[in-house]
Image (cartoon, rainbow, N blue to C red):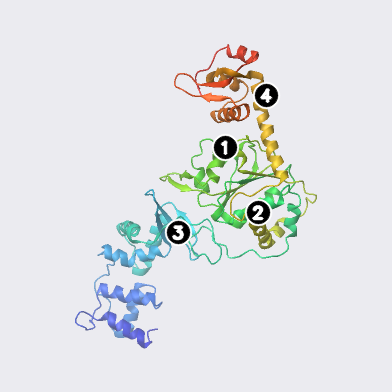
Amino acid sequence: MVGNFLLRCSIHFLMLDADGVVPAVLGHERTVSVFDFLIERGEATTFREATDIVAEFSGVAAPKTPFKPYAVTNAEWIVEHCVPVLNKSFALLRAADGTERMFALNDRNEATLVLKETPLMQTLHDHLKVKFEKIPPASVLAASMELWKREGRKIRHEPEPFCFRGDERACFKRFDWEPTRGDYQAWEEFLSRLTDRDAFLAFVWSAFEKRNESRQYLWLRGEGQDGKSKVLGVLLDVFGKEAGTGISNAHLTKDNRFLFSALYGKRVVVYADCKNPKVGMSEFIRNCTSGDEVQVEYKGQTPFSSKMYLKLFIASNPKPQLTGQNADVSRMLYIEVAESKNKDDPSWAARLRAELPAFLHACRHIYEKLCAHHGNIPINENSQALRDGATVAFEQSYYDIFDAMFVLKLGGSVAAAIVRQLAKGMGINTNHEMADFKEWMEREKKVRFVGGRQRRSYEGMELTQLGAALASGGVDGGDRR
């Protein structure tokens, strides 16, 4: 084991005392130095093995007194024996807002957010226990954590959601493959039933293109039995749980302050079987697609802010509803999928997965053709008509409310509280819905909202006879929007 001449010389050198003499009994500190050398060379794995090797080599005995490896655990000792252990598997991000986040990093430099210090302390505990054959005291572990945060391994930026082969940056998901040209007949059967196949292909690739920070999201609608959920499930599997996730209607409850913790570090989010046709007008859509800073809160942890550039895929049976506001319209890629003629092919999902490299090669080709500058993906006339139809269908109720309650008149004025009261009686209940109606009146009817402390009003219109009769019943002053 120790027959190698250079190895024997190295051990001999480490054993020398200050006078250049090999002592009869090796001290604790010198034994640890020899052990560290042996374990780096793979010659020993425990303290006992190291002392046996030394005894076999030179006849020098281990310390006569009980070995106390944790008797002196100052900063220098921790930096030597503990910090390197943590650096092998963990790294710290100190963000611009002062918050700290710990990440576990595997040998592929893939990151996992670590919410508590427990995994780090367990890793260090296990290492020290093996190395010194004694359980380390809690005080050593706690001190090591504090010093590691100051002296240990750091990363300067949030890990990337994903990286392709050859990109060695820290990321949540690393792809070891690249798209290749080939046949994708299973995908072609699905693409042939889309109203805008090119926009679909380009949007899929935009999820893999880090330079694309478009605010668009995809709404895929069909009556059912059309394979849309299965297709989105295959795409979600590509990113895995590290860089992708699925959400449901339960995630979008009003008081779900932990929503963005489920989305942190993700690139792709799939909202399959969406039951809310109005979700495209929600604050959630604007937050998760705009690259804005959002508050990320894990249960029991200090919140922190992070930017999110998510690629959102929505699948639904109901048609989407949205206003004609540019903020709503410009984000949505609305594509419909026709019913499949072949509903009993158990191999279809497996073939979709097998054809992914060829399919994604086609996606990249179309993306480069339609989106050379990594901005918004253009849509065809079919998608444009579908999107316009969705806005007209939704805003028809606004026309009905306005025609029943108001009439345009130069110099006319209606108090905002009365408009609010009448609109509420016609089904506009929330502040968000009222804001959409207000924006529609300004955009389509050219009325002007005037705000002030004493009175808020809509100028350029007056009440119809029905509106005046209903308003005379009293005005709810609780909401003076």
Dots 4, 2 in contact, CB < 8 A:
no
- The crowding category of the residue bearing disc 1, from other C-alpha atoms within 10 Å (few below 14, some 14 to 19, many at least 20), is few
Viewer-nearest of labels 4 and 3? 4
Viewer-nearest of labels 4 and 2? 2
- The crowding category of the residue bearing disc 3, from other C-alpha atoms within 10 Å (few below 14, some 14 to 19, many at least 20), is some
Relative horizontal placement of residue 67, taking residue 286 as reference (left or right): left
Relative horizontal placement of residue 156, taking residue 164 as reference (left or right): left
- The crowding category of the residue bearing disc 4, from other C-alpha atoms within 10 Å (few below 14, some 14 to 19, many at least 20), is few
Q: Looking at the image, can residue 347 be seen?
A: no
Distance from Cα at disc 4 to Cα at disc 1 = 23 Å
- Residue 44 in the image: x percent, y percent? 38, 76
Q: Residue beneath label 2, please?
A: 370
Give the mark nearest the N terminus, 4 or 1.
1
Give the mark nearest the N terminus, 3 or 2.
3
Relative horizontal placement of residue 170, taking residue 466 as reference (left or right): left
- Residue 142 in the image: x percent, y percent? 32, 56
The numbered disc on residue 17 is: none
| Quadrant containing the N terminus in the rendered view | bottom left
Q: Residue beneath label 3, please?
A: 104
For the residue pair 456 and 428, the one nearer the viewer reads as: 456
Instruction: Please name the amino acid that badge 3 sits on.
Output: Ala
Instruction: Please name the amino acid that badge 4 sits on.
Output: Asp
Instruction: Please name the amino acid that badge 1 sits on.
Output: Ser
Give the mark nearest the N terminus, 4 or 2.
2
Q: Residue beneath label 1, please?
A: 282
For the residue pair 88 and 444, the one nearer the viewer reads as: 444
Q: Residue beneath label 4, please?
A: 400
